[in-house]
Image (spheres, coloured by chain):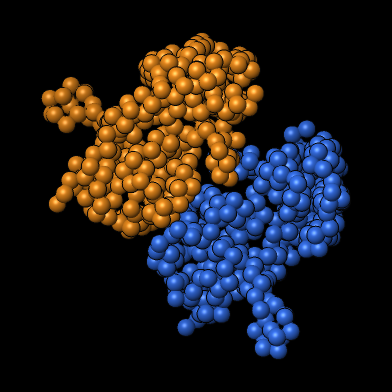
Chain colours: A blue, B orange
């Protein structure tokens, strides 16, 4: 029994960010413009504040401008729309990210639709979803974009591979399926109503798990040699009894990693697999958006 | 060996058009508005002229207004864009259909994107593709919409069925996959690079063939009892030797119908299956668009 290659998303994303830093340098030299990412946070959610700070730090670290906007938790929807409108027209802003979740009195789809699709570096705008579906160039949601990079790094060409996506969310499963199809995979999308998941898994050269259930995908379901991408981030009690008793937790994926690593040819760990790719892809989208916006003008 | 139920698209679409005629009557009574479909034809392509005339006749037959616009084959892209802009703002027009193909000097995506998404009764606009991908209400391309009606008519709920879509075009295969996924099917999309098509076929409760290759799908590939939807419209030489010698042709589907009917539980014939559904779904989309547009105002 051979052990799978552990796909190191931390190292890969670090290399990607170095490459982006080079791209930013070249871009500055060629167009005399510094790509700018505006990050909007409404309210004081502690987890959101940590994410936002991390995004801002990494933006600065690759040489881009980070523009921070903070609105009070009680800010009205119109205030937020006004801010987005200003950012849409600000030539120093090439990417706009509104940190989710938003307070309940604000309608999230209305906000996401208000962002200029060409500055929508999260790839959540209906126009970018449509471009992806039609196959024209688009800003792609960051997590599936990162999964694709890891897959291509592991496999080279994906052409003709049988890919199974477990989960059909609009931010991971569905765009992931579109990207795999564009890469000439035969793509199956499974979900809670799927009846023969184990059988489908057993046929897949590529398994992308994005269901949000700890250790849902079992090693016995996998085809030997499959490449497994685990998008899950699930908080469970710590393994150590004392730590568990003290209320400590740990993060696990949607795949039974230890056992699956004995069957797969390559697998992403959780943490340290897909997770670190997301912000790197956000930065990558921002450079892409800056390229598109400055070449169009 | 039992013979499959032959799904009669001609009868189904005729019933659908009767239902639409009733909807139009109710709509007129309730809102004092007659739904209007504008059909734009550029040039003199004989096949396009026939399609357009048929659409216009059927529009009138269900009690809607049919508005015809004819542009010369030499009309400029700007002339066509100006016309679309006028139709976008015309309150008597609820649906706009630009007959494809367009002359080569006109950029088709530019034209399709110029149509107001809420009047895009062909469902080809990037915003409608995006709405479909995200799962918000949209105007759905007519052929896959028709296929879904026939499937639901045959099977009732599609929940948990294994559906295989062969072909990944933006006007049939891809939106078809989205619709099947929204109906809780487990969906696989296959195409020219798929390696194990026969095996995938054998697992499918639903097979939608949209490849454009005569008799491509063989009876031996099908799971007994599968429901088969044949989107193919392929012109081949006539069977009769004398007719063939005289250059006569006939229309066949993507499925080996005669043999497949011995294995499937239900199957659409070609012609007379999916084909007649397309215009009926166009009319259905127009009523839907009229409803949305008049309730919004």
Q: Position of residue A1 (x, y in %)?
A: 47, 83
Residue A126 vertical position relative to residue B11 in the rendered view, above or below: below
> Closest to the observer: A16 or B267?
B267
- How many labels sit on residues? 0
Name the residue at 39% across, 49% down. B158
> Closest to the observer: B225 or A58?
B225
Residue A31 vertical position relative to residue B282 in the rendered view, above or below: below
Residue B50 vertical position relative to residue A261 in the rendered view, above or below: above
Q: Position of residue A223 (x, y in %)?
A: 43, 71
Residue B288 vertical position relative to residue A293 in the rendered view, above or below: above
Q: Position of residue A234 (x, y in %)?
A: 64, 69
Name the residue at 67% across, 47% down. A123
- Left or right of A118, for residue B17: left
Tell me the quadrant of the picture where the C terminus of chain B can be found.
Answer: top right
Look at the image and tell me whether residue B33 can be seen: yes
Name the residue at 44% across, 32% down. B142
> Closest to the observer: A129 or B65?
B65
> Closest to the observer: A123 or A69?
A69
- Left or right of A192, for residue A113: right
Q: Position of residue B67 (x, y in %)?
A: 50, 12
Name the residue at 43% across, 64% down. A197
Look at the image and tell me whether residue B212 can be seen: no
Quarter location, residue B118: top right
Q: Residue furthest bottom?
A: A242
């Amino acid at each position: 029994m051979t052990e799978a290659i552990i796909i190191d998303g931390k190292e890969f994303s670090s290399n990607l960010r170095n490459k982006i830093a080079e791209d930013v340098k070249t871009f500055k030299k060629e167009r005399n413009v510094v790509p700018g990412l505006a990050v909007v946070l409404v309210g004081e959610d502690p987890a959101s504040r940590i994410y936002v700070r991390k995004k801002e730090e990494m933006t600065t670290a690759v040489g881009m401008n980070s523009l921070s906007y903070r609105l009070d938790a009680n800010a009205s929807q119109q205030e937020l729309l006004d801010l987005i409108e200003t950012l849409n027209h600000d030539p120093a802003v090439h990417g706009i990210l509104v940190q989710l979740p938003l307070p309940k009195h604000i309608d999230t789809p209305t906000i996401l639709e208000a962002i200029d699709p060409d500055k929508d570096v999260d790839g959540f705008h209906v126009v970018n979803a449509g471009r992806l579906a039609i196959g024209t160039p688009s800003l792609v949601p960051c997590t599936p974009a990162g999964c694709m990079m890891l897959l291509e790094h592991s496999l080279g060409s994906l052409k003709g591979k049988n890919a199974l996506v477990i989960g059909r969310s609009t931010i991971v499963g569905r765009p992931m399926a579109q990207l795999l199809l564009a890469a000439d995979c035969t793509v199956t999308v499974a979900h809670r109503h799927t009846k023969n998941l184990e059988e489908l898994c057993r046929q897949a050269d590529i398994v992308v798990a994005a269901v949000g259930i700890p250790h849902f995908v079992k090693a016995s379901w996998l085809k030997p040699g499959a490449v497994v991408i685990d998008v899950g981030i699930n908080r469970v009690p710590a393994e150590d009894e004392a730590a568990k008793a003290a209320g400590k937790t740990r993060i696990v994926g949607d795949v039974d990693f230890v056992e699956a690593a004995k069957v797969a040819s390559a697998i992403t760990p959780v943490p340290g697999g897909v997770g670190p790719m997301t912000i790197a892809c956000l930065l990558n989208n921002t450079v892409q958006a800056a390229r598109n916006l400055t070449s169009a003008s």
